Amino acid sequence: MKDKVKIFDTTLRDGEQCPGATMTLDEKIRVARQLAKLNVDVIEAGFPISSDDDFESVKTISGEIQGPEIAGLCRCVEKDINRGWEALKNASNPRLHIFLATSPQHREFKFKKAQNEILKMAVEMTQYAASLCPNIEFSTEDAARTELSYLAEVVEAVIAAGATTVNVPDTVGYAMPWQYGETIAYLFKNVKNINDAVISTHCHNDLGLAVANSLSAVVNGARQVEVAINGLGERAGNCSLEEVVMAIKTRSDVINVETSINTKEIMPASKLIRQITGFAVAPNKAIVGDNAFRHEAGIHQHGMLANRTTYEIMSPDDIGIHPEDLGGGLVLGKHSGHHAFKKRLEELGYELNETEVNRALKQFKDLADKKKKVYDEDIRAIIDEVTNVGAKPTYTIDTLSYTSGNKQTPEATVKLKKGDELLEGKTSTGDGPVDAIFQAMNQITNIECELIDYSIRSVTSGREALGEVTVKVKSKEKIYSGVGASTDVIEASAKAYLNCINRIL
């Protein structure tokens, strides 16, 4: 029987720390539900002491999500641990995750403490946390730059103090795969009580080695890997859930371990994170990139027609990609009814209330009137917009019109509704029709924000393709993202920008 490697997902904690990736409570619950569908072993739901919002997120997820262990991150400080336990105590399987840096850089410059002082803090706070919760994870922050003998001393001491999992992070993405693997092997050789705890990895991707380092650790005895969907996280990100899971599944012949992940939920999870954060993934991103299962070279296409294993080591179906996602497959039509449409949404993994289903069905039929073919990707784009990325729509678009040309100043007129109230329209000029629309919306809502990113992509192919626009704005030092979809990219831009305004409010 193969050993099991636990998958500890930190998308909601370390992933959300990525600039611009802040999520609302509703969004975090949606992500947590998807993580439960993925069957991850642990969900790190947040850092309870960091803010009231984080506390409420951890507390709510602890009460609502069944299946995975729910973890909250805490510094090695009593007030952090108390706050963390208050948020977690109603979880069916809570885990207190405490951390303390051990490297010379952190001891000297951050803490200004000697090795024995750091060790004392680690032991005392582990004992205190264990008095509240039987499931304790201790992280030796910046372990990859810590002296091996001292690292082993700390690991042995915290296990003796009650830690049931010990995480050995490469916090700054500094290690080489062989070096990181040797660190794990050293601990197994030199920590006498190491089999009393699960050894975990948490690797950052600053040198593009997070997955390689994590797998090297697994080969050398680690049995938990800390990951994030799409590799989301601080700086260059975390170890990618989809990459490490599919590497273990595809090459179990040489890695000789397994996970409990339901891999068919990988693509839905990836798309959900893209939608909520507004962060696209590169087309050539491993596993979940748009081109990961597409073949253009003639010799590749010939091989694929003969037998797909000639150029594919995984099946798209393994990660939840439907044939329609790769460019084919007509889905429903303008005469489809409520029940058929709702069933297709369920097949695609969406859980919408009746109001959202009805709004989505109306938009679907409007789109079906404009397009001959409506694909699953079109439906997903509609749902992304209807669910409004977690925001309650204070404003909606009533009408918009614009004029533009190479020898005239772009001008737009916008009318918005606030609830059922039709507001006075505003006309504005701008650098282009999109900018003019944005300026008119600012005048109506009295919201001032700075546009920091604008991207557009074709959801499907052809002249009638649905265009999806993602907008990011900054308001009062916070970054907000919005998504809009339409066969008219100007309208899609207006929807995306108004989505941001609603999120600000």
Image (cartoon, rainbow, N blue to C red):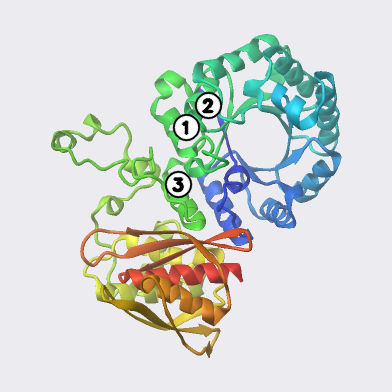
Q: Is residue 273 left or right of residue 43?
A: left
Residues under numbered marks 2 and 1 in contact, where contact means CB atoms less than 8 Å apart: yes
Return the residue at label 3. 265
- Mark 2 vs 1, N-terminal side: 2
Residue at (44, 41) in percent of width and height: 263
Q: Is residue 101 left or right of residue 344?
A: right
Q: Is residue 74 left or right of residue 189?
A: right
Three-letter amino acid code at disc 2? Ser
Query: Viewer-proximal residue, 84 or 121?
Result: 121
Badge 1: residue crowd in 10 Å (few <14, some 14–19, many ≥20): many
Three-letter amino acid code at disc 3? Glu
- Mark 3 vs 1, N-terminal side: 1
Q: Secondary structure at mark 1?
A: helix
- Mark 2 vs 3, N-terminal side: 2
Task: Locate residue 296: give its quadrant.
Answer: top left
Return the residue at label 1. 244
Residues under numbered marks 3 and 1 in contact, where contact means CB atoms less than 8 Å apart: no
Q: Position of residue 410 (x, y in %)?
A: 35, 77
Please tell me the numbered disc located at residue 12.
none
In the rendered image, is residue 400 in sight? yes
| Rendered position, 108 above or below 22 | above
Residue at (69, 10) in percent of width and height: 190
| Rendered position, 157 above or below 78 | above
Q: Secondary structure at mark 3?
A: helix
Q: Quadrant of the C terminus?
A: bottom right
Return the residue at label 2. 214
Badge 3: residue crowd in 10 Å (few <14, some 14–19, many ≥20): many
Q: Position of residue 3 (x, y in %)?
A: 54, 23
